[in-house]
Image: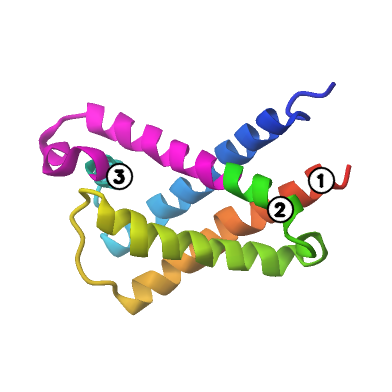
Amino acid sequence: MRPFSSFPGTVLLAGLITGTLDILSAFVYFSVVSHGQPVSKILVYISSGVFGKAAFSGGPAMMWWGLLFHYLIALTWSFVFFVLYPKIAGLHKHPVATGLVYGLLVWCVMNLVVVPLSQVPHGPLRLVNSVINILILMAMIGLPLSFMARKYYTR
């Protein structure tokens, strides 16, 4: 048995890959738009979903909490995708469309449901930022998950 050939191993690997692709993209994007602010602010922002405003004065531990929460979220989205993939007919025939739609779905649920229900300080959605973030999720979460699931389920 190859490592990561089991369902749990494959989902774990998918979560680690997509979580890493997503956070690295977020770091690059944040560095560009913030003109070089430390990317640790992203991780603290993520941890504020649970810890609220206290995260911003909580020291370095908040970065680690943010990273943990980020990977737990990526793992959850990976698990959901791998569970739904064999249940929805035709997804394996259109991996690009499937990945793009899933990336959009992830953005919608995270930004329209999860973030508003969390303690994250949030302002109005900005169209340009939203489009860029949707494209990141499509490319870094949706497409990789689609191709990984297709490979897993057609072996």
Could you tell which of marks 3 and 2 lies nearer the N-terminus? 3
Which residues are drawn in magenta? 49-78
Colour basis: rainbow
Q: Gap in Å between the C-alphas at discs 1 and 2?
A: 9 Å
Amino acid residing under circle 2: Tyr
Could you tell which of marks 1 and 2 lies nearer the N-terminus? 2
Counting from the top left corner in percent of width and height, residue 8 is at 66, 30
Crowd class of label 2 (few under 14; some 14 to 19; many from 20; radius 10 Å): some
Could you tell which of marks 1 and 3 lies nearer the N-terminus? 3
Against 120, is 134 above or below? below
Q: Quadrant of the C terminus?
A: top right
Amino acid residing under circle 1: Tyr
Counting from the top left corner in percent of width and height, residue 35 is at 26, 60
Residue assigned mark 3: 46
Give the SS element for disc 1: helix
Counting from the top left corner in percent of width and height, residue 153 is at 81, 45
Task: Say which residue appears at 53% left-offset and 47% top-offset.
Answer: 77
Give the SS element for disc 2: helix
Q: Quick check: 69 left or right of 124?
A: right
Residue assigned mark 1: 153
Q: Quadrant of residue 17?
A: top right
Q: Gap in Å between the C-alphas at discs 1 and 3?
A: 32 Å
Give the main secondary structure of the magenta stretch. helix
Give the SS element for disc 3: helix
Counting from the top left corner in percent of width and height, residue 99 is at 65, 62
Magenta highlight on residue 53 = yes
Task: Say which residue appears at 46% left-offset and 37% top-offset.
Answer: 71
Residue assigned mark 2: 85
Crowd class of label 3 (few under 14; some 14 to 19; many from 20; radius 10 Å): many
State if disc 3 and disc 1 touch (CB < 8 Å): no
Amino acid residing under circle 3: Ile
